[in-house]
Image (tube, rainbow, N blue to C red):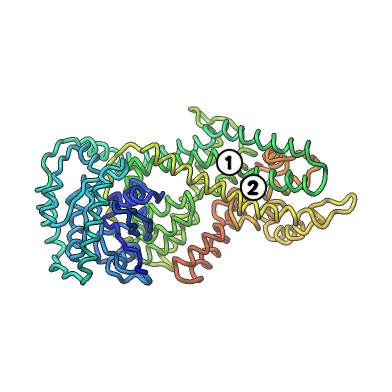
């Protein structure tokens, strides 16, 4: 039985390869309006017009086969048949950005020079026309010597014609499987001259529409105004996390309470009812109620990505990051780490300099991932008054913004120290292609939000659920004697006593100490652990997630609560993040170093926060 035929999508970053991949295969690969989204090869199934299947491979964007980063190396190896365990793709689908044709034609010449069956997808023609460019695909096809198919991937235009062209190229490859003779290689300067010539011939008309974008960029990329606008956007984002999420969070809390009331009224008292109310509903329910905050946070991030502003934010941050020995190219992985450090660490493959890449990996966990948001939201809601500080600025949102800023400052300080010691080196150059501005598509935003919400709920239903049940069992056995606290008698209480001896000097109580252990599985488990612990300790059978905020407010002092927040600003990420760091650094040396220095920072700054707060009489 012969193996399935293959076609590979190749091109510059931000040419729309992932959008085209999704449209052709029906997959839901992440797409965004900034370079560096795809950091490893992705495969899907394309059905050709004849009904024959083809494996379609989406490769990371590249500027050259002279690989300058790990993701470009993936592309080079796959295209040249050097990737372990993978055969040479029969057809190359070269994706070009119609609005940035000259730049993309430089790499296109390298691909076409291989002499392999190649089809050009002239993508995003609608945006080129919007910007005042009128192109002649036939002229481009004549100049390049390969089929050129106009496409608009996000609107599914040109897909049938592209599939037909891929099939024809595959038929030619099957008829003549002998290796092609590559064309003579041109120097980079020669390819640039030829790209300018070909692009000029393919452009029929050009308007002054692009001047509007240039004027906007003069404001957004201004060295002084640009950072102010960026931090203003981030400030509004964190205000919205509290202000906009409240009615939705209240609705989820009411639903959890109603379910708990029904369980108490329906089930007889005993093991099963306690498991459901104290374990599942009090634990998992206390985390699920923070879903609205997660969705609002990602709505802002996805809009920034889709609109083209994310790349501008990276450019703005370049000067700041150069001051700590990094480049703006580290900004995209670090910003991705606000969602989760795992894709952030994987996105460092687009960084060419190995010392830059290692430093970015080591500081990525300091970015405040979405898993910390439930912890922050719980503690802030419990101990910070829901008041304004002038101009309608909410104090709770301001504190949340401050925690995110603290993580950023901590990351920059750590990068500066690392670049002067264990990852010593100077800042590398930073060149990024600015994507055009465009309105975010509601469908893409909806898919992105659904994916993030589903990931959050899946964690709640798997990792958090399992950790919560395990903790409830440890809290419930052995049974306490009459007059004895159940927490004191339980196995979990014994564990808490040991951990508490270590963290008591920095102001942590025993419940907080116990929550730190399962939180290594996932940050959100700290919330479910606290909820389960207080539910078991309470004599109220109807205790649910609703009561957790009141328990924290009643039992914790303000210095203790602030110390707990400070701990989570710096504490290491979950075990999955540590495992990914191990894979990306090819060993345990750097992950162990990362965990060690982050625990040290968490302990020191939690202690400083507690001692200073106590000294100030808070």
Return the residue at label 1.
290
Return the residue at label 2.
527
Near mark 2 (Cα within 10 A), the count class, few <14, some 14-19 or many ≥20, is many
Judged left or right of residue 505, residue 302 is left
As drawn, 354 above or below 251? below
Q: Nearer the viewer, residue 99 or 178?
A: 178
**In the rendering, at what x and y percent does residue 17 appear?**
31, 52
Q: Nearer the viewer, residue 175 or 339?
A: 175
Q: Nearer the viewer, residue 492 or 614?
A: 492
Judged left or right of residue 358, residue 399 is right
* Res 57 seen here: no
Marks 1/2: CA–CA distance? 10 Å
**In the rendering, at what x and y percent does residue 42 appear?**
38, 58
**In the rendering, at what x and y percent does residue 518 appear?**
65, 56
- The quarter of the image holding the N terminus is bottom left
**In the rendering, at what x and y percent does residue 26 appear?**
38, 49
Q: Which mark is residue 422?
A: none
């Amino acid at each position: 039985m012969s193996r399935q035929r293959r076609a590979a999508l190749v091109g510059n970053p931000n040419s729309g390869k992932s959008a085209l991949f999704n449209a052709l295969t029906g997959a839901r690969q992440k797409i965004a309006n900034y370079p560096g989204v795809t950091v490893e090869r992705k495969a899907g199934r394309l059905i050709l017009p004849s009904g024959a299947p083809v494996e379609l491979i989406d490769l990371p964007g590249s500027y050259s086969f002279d690989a300058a980063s790990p993701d470009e190396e993936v592309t080079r190896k796959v295209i040249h048949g050097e990737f372990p365990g993978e055969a040479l793709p029969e057809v190359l689908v070269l994706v070009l950005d119609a609005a940035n044709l000259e730049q993309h034609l430089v790499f296109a010449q390298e691909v076409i020079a291989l002499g392999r069956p190649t089809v050009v997808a002239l993508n995003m023609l609608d945006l080129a026309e919007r910007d005042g460019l009128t192109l002649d695909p036939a002229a481009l096809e004549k100049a390049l010597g390969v089929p050129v198919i106009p496409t608009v991937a996000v609107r599914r235009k040109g897909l049938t014609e592209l599939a037909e062209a891929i099939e024809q190229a595959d038929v030619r490859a099957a008829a003549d499987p002998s290796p092609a003779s590559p064309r003579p290689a041109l120097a980079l300067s020669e390819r640039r001259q030829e790209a300018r010539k070909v692009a000029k011939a393919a452009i029929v008309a050009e308007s002054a529409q692009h001047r509007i974008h240039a004027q906007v960029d003069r404001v957004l990329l201004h060295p002084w105004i640009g950072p102010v606008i960026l931090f203003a956007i981030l400030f509004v984002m964190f205000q919205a996390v509290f202000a906009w999420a409240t009615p939705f969070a209240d609705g989820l809390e009411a639903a959890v309470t109603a379910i708990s009331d029904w369980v108490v009224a329906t089930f007889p008292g005993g093991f099963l009812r306690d498991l459901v109310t104290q374990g599942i509903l009090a634990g998992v329910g206390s985390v699920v109620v923070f879903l609205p905050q997660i969705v609002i946070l990602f709505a802002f991030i996805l809009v920034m990505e889709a609109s083209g502003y994310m790349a501008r934010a990276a450019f703005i941050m370049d000067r700041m990051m150069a001051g700590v020995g990094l480049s703006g190219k580290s900004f995209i992985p670090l910003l991705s780490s606000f969602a989760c450090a795992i894709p952030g660490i994987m996105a460092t493959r687009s960084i060419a300099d190995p010392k830059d890449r290692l430093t970015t990996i080591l500081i990525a966990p300091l970015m405040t991932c979405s898993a910390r948001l439930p912890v922050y939201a719980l503690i802030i809601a419990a101990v910070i008054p829901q008041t304004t500080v002038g101009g309608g600025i909410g104090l709770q949102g301001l504190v949340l913004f401050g925690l995110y800023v603290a993580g950023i400052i901590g990351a920059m300080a750590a990068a500066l120290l690392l670049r002067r010691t264990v990852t010593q080196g100077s800042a590398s150059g930073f060149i990024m292609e600015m994507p055009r501005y465009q309105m975010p598509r509601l469908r893409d935003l909806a898919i992105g939000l659904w994916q993030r919400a589903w990931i959050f709920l899946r964690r709640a239903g798997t990792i958090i659920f399992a950790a919560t049940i395990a903790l409830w069992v440890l809290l419930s056995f052995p049974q306490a004697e009459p007059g004895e606290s159940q927490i004191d008698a339980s196995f979990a209480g014994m564990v808490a006593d040991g951990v508490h001896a270590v963290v008591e000097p920095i102001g942590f109580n025993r419940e907080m100490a116990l929550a730190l252990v399962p939180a290594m599985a996932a940050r959100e488990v700290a919330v479910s652990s606290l909820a389960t612990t207080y539910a078991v300790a309470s004599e109220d059978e109807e205790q649910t997630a609703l009561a957790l905020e009141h328990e924290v407010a009643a039992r914790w002092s303000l210095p203790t609560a602030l110390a707990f927040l400070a701990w989570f600003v710096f504490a290491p990420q979950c075990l999955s993040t540590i495992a990914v760091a191990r894979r990306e650094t090819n060993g345990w040396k750097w992950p162990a170093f990362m965990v060690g220095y982050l625990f040290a920072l968490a302990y020191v700054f939690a202690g400083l926060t507690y001692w200073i707060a106590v000294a100030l009489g808070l």
